[in-house]
């Protein structure tokens, strides 16, 4: 069973590398960028190689056998 965490998106989007760092999937921004460059990250089930890819509400990011479900918060 894979672990899934919810991430409350506060703006329109968050860059992929920032999401990985913020959620603890990567220990630093450099580690997050290396994970993406190494092909270890998927967005909505598809391999994603763009480190600064804009992740929006409703998308699911997967890495290392776990997933981040991005949800919109009520605020703006």
Image: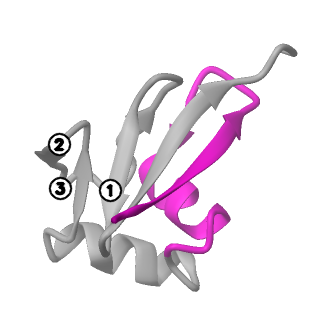
Q: Which residue is mark 2?
A: 45
Residue 26 picture location, percent across and down: 50, 78
Rendered residue at 32%/56% (across/down): 62
Under circle 3, the secondary element is loop
Q: Residues within 10 Å of mark 2 (few under 14, many from 20)?
A: few
Q: How is the image coloured?
A: one colour
Q: Which residue is mark 1?
A: 62
Rendered residue at 66%/63% (across/down): 22
Q: Residues within 10 Å of mark 3 (few under 14, many from 20)?
A: some
Dividing the picture into quadrants, the one containing residue 46 is top left
- Mark nearest the camera among 2 and 3 is 2
Image side of residue 12 versus residue 49, left or right: right
Residue 67 picture location, percent across and down: 41, 55
Q: Are marks 1 and 3 in contact (CB under 8 Å)?
A: no
Image side of residue 17 versus residue 19, left or right: left
Magenta stretch: residue 20 in it?
yes
Q: Residue 17: which numbered mark, if any?
A: none
Q: How many marks?
A: 3
Under circle 2, the secondary element is loop
Rendered position, 32 above or below 74: below
Q: CA distance from mark 1 to mark 3?
A: 13 Å
Q: Which residue is mark 3?
A: 49
Q: Are marks 2 and 3 in contact (CB under 8 Å)?
A: no
Rendered position, 66 above or below 69: below
Rendered residue at 17%/56% (across/down): 49
Under circle 1, the secondary element is strand
Q: Are marks 1 and 2 in contact (CB under 8 Å)?
A: yes
> Where does the C terminus fall, quadrant-wise?
top right
What's the magenta region?
1-25
Rendered position, 32 above or below 10: below
Residue 35 picture location, percent across and down: 29, 76
């Amino acid at each position: 069973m894979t672990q899934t965490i919810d991430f409350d998106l506060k703006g329109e989007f968050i860059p992929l590398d920032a999401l990985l760092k913020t959620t603890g999937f990567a220990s630093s921004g450099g580690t997050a960028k290396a994970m993406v460059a190494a092909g270890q990250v998927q967005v909505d089930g598809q391999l994603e190689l763009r480190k600064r890819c804009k992740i929006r509400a409703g998308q699911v990011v997967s890495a290392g056998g776990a997933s981040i479900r991005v949800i919109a918060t009520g605020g703006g």
